[in-house]
Amino acid sequence: MTATPATHFALSDGRQIRRLGYGAMRLCGPGVWGFHADRRNHLAVLHRARDLGVHLFDTSDAYGPDVNEYQIAEALHPYDGLLIATKGGLTRNGPNHWGRDGRPDRLSRCLRNSLRRLEVETIDLYQLHAPDPNVPFEDSVGRLFEEQKAGLIRHVGLSNVTADQLRTALSLGPIVTVQNRYNLTDRSSADVLAVCEEHHVGFLPWYPLAAGELARPGAVLDRVAQKHGCTHAQAALAWLLARSPVMLPIPGTSSVAHLEANMQAEGVQLDAQDMAELEAAA
């Protein structure tokens, strides 16, 4: 048997948060554009996530755009005991279209707009959504540290970075989290995860439930799920939680039922054989 993964993660200031969080992007409309057709559904999902004990809620000014932050504020403000994480640095001009703009002055404007929409004076966790190839990385990250010193950001995070970029950012100041794509079928950020483990930086895997062929009938994820009497999603989340103590999955859904099922993944304890088979399956 493997040890039961810890359910909480300690931030750099000592605050303990539940490792399973919630990614709110799916509460927007198709293509992450505009509001969801059911304008009240976001309240039900976000309220249930809070009631289930979720601490970390992840959003971005690019989701909607702006819409998702308004949804978070409507449902959860004043955020007692919650950690609200948002991001800046992307641009939108239509459904499923994503651009990058990491100019320092624009990041400052994005930050202030997020403060207004979220109705707070300080963002708990503000993340650079993605490096801009047209802007020196140090300039973008450096501006976030300046805003942190000004009291507008409590913790600085990164998203969609390389291991070298993470090391560069760590040389400039404290990085609390990194959010990169990572799941059973895409482990290309394994080197970034290793740096996070070395420096006790939380790793938020986006698109955490992708399983592809591993979930087909009789494939390894299907076998593991049947063995433990759980869903494929629960098995995939259990693997992430067991994969690394700094892993902070933020599965997103617009369904209360799926949310409730996802949170039950903490109770799925994979053994050494499960982990070995899943590790070898990528």
Image (cartoon, rainbow, N blue to C red):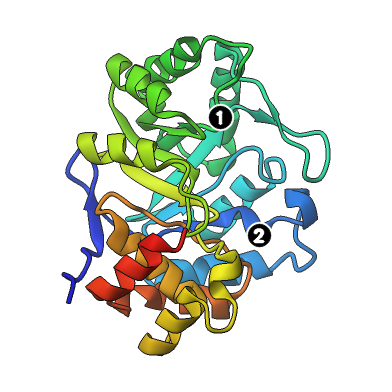
- Label 1, residues with CA under 10 Å away: few <14, some 14-19, many ≥20: many
Query: Residue visible at 63% across and 64% down?
Result: 42
Q: CA distance from mark 1 to mark 2?
A: 21 Å
Residue 40 sits in which quadrant? bottom right
Answer above or below: position of 183 versus 103: below
Task: Out of 257 and 244, give the one closest to the viewer.
Answer: 244
Answer above or below: position of 187 versus 173: below
Residue 189 in picture, x, y percent from top left = 44, 41
Q: Is residue 222 left or right of residue 117?
A: left
Residue 16 in picture, x, y percent from top left = 22, 53
Label 1 is placed on what type of residue?
Answer: Ala
Residue at which label 2 appears: 27
Query: Residue visible at 42% across and 67% down?
Result: 237
Which secondary structure, mark 2? helix
Sequence-first tag of 1 and 2: 2
Q: Is residue 247 left or right of residue 251?
A: left
Task: Out of 280 and 98, give the one closest to the viewer.
Answer: 280
Answer above or below: position of 220 versus 247: below
Residue 41 in picture, x, y percent from top left = 67, 70
The reply to whether residue 161 is visible in this rendering is yes
Query: Residue visible at 52% across and 41% down?
Result: 119
Residue at which label 1 appears: 130
